């Protein structure tokens, strides 16, 4: 069994080995609701507009994952996909229904 000193040493090493906690930033970008940038290349947001896609590319992102259903009010999945393609971004549409997840 480990003694107290060994346990404390393991905890200290574990805490030092943790990656730095990412700073979340919330820039205001026209056409993007609730943008939260978690890392240099990772962010999450609410709905976007096709017009916002070029700005997403300028921010350094390589892909867009769209979870909206095409039937949602205001969703324009086809136009967002076309805008992503035109901007040179990968686009993944994975519709998710929060009321009926499967």
Image (cartoon, rainbow, N blue to C red):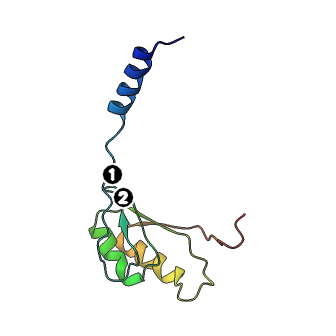
User: Considering the numbered disc 2 on the image, is that residue within a helix, a strand or a loop?
Assistant: loop
Binning the other alpha carbons within 10 Å of mark 1 as few (below 14), some (14 to 19) or many (20 upward) gives few
User: Considering the numbered disc 1 on the image, is that residue within a helix, a strand or a loop?
Assistant: loop
Q: Going from the N terminus, do you reach mark 1 or mark 2 first?
A: 1
Report x, y in % for residue 73: 57, 89
Q: Is residue 66 above or below residue 71?
A: above
The residue that appears at 61% across and 71% down in the rendered structure is 95
Q: Quadrant of residue 17?
A: top left
Q: Quadrant of residue 38?
A: bottom left
Residue 2 shown left or right of residue 31 in the figure: right
The residue that appears at 39% across and 29% down in the rendered structure is 14
Report x, y in % for residue 101: 70, 66
* Residue at mark 1: 22
Residue 43 shown left or right of residue 100 in the figure: left
Q: Looking at the picture, tell me which residue is in the foreground, 6 or 46.
A: 6
Q: Residue furthest bottom?
A: 73
* Gap between marks 1 and 2 measured at Cα: 6 Å
Asked whether the beta carbons under mark 1 and mark 2 sit within 8 Å of each other, the answer is: yes
Report x, y in % for residue 47: 47, 78
Q: Which disc, if any, is residue 66? A: none
The C terminus, quarter of image: bottom right
Q: Looking at the picture, tell me which residue is in the foreground, 10 or 42.
A: 10
Q: Is residue 41 above or below residue 66?
A: above
The residue that appears at 37% across and 20% down in the rendered structure is 9
Q: Residue furthest left?
A: 58
Q: Residue furthest front?
A: 4
* Residue at mark 2: 38
The N terminus, quarter of image: top right
Report x, y in % for residue 81: 48, 75
The residue that appears at 33% across and 60% down in the rendered structure is 24
């Amino acid at each position: 069994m480990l003694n107290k000193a060994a346990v404390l040493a393991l905890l200290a090493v574990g805490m030092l080995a943790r990656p730095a906690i990412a700073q979340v930033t919330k820039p205001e970008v026209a056409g993007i609701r609730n943008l939260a940038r978690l890392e240099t290349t990772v962010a999450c947001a609410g709905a976007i507009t096709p017009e916002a896609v070029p700005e997403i590319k300028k921010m350094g992102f390589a892909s867009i994952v769209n979870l909206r259903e095409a039937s949602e009010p205001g969703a324009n999945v086809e136009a967002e996909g076309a805008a992503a393609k035109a901007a040179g971004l990968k686009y993944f549409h994975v519709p998710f229904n929060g009321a009926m997840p499967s």
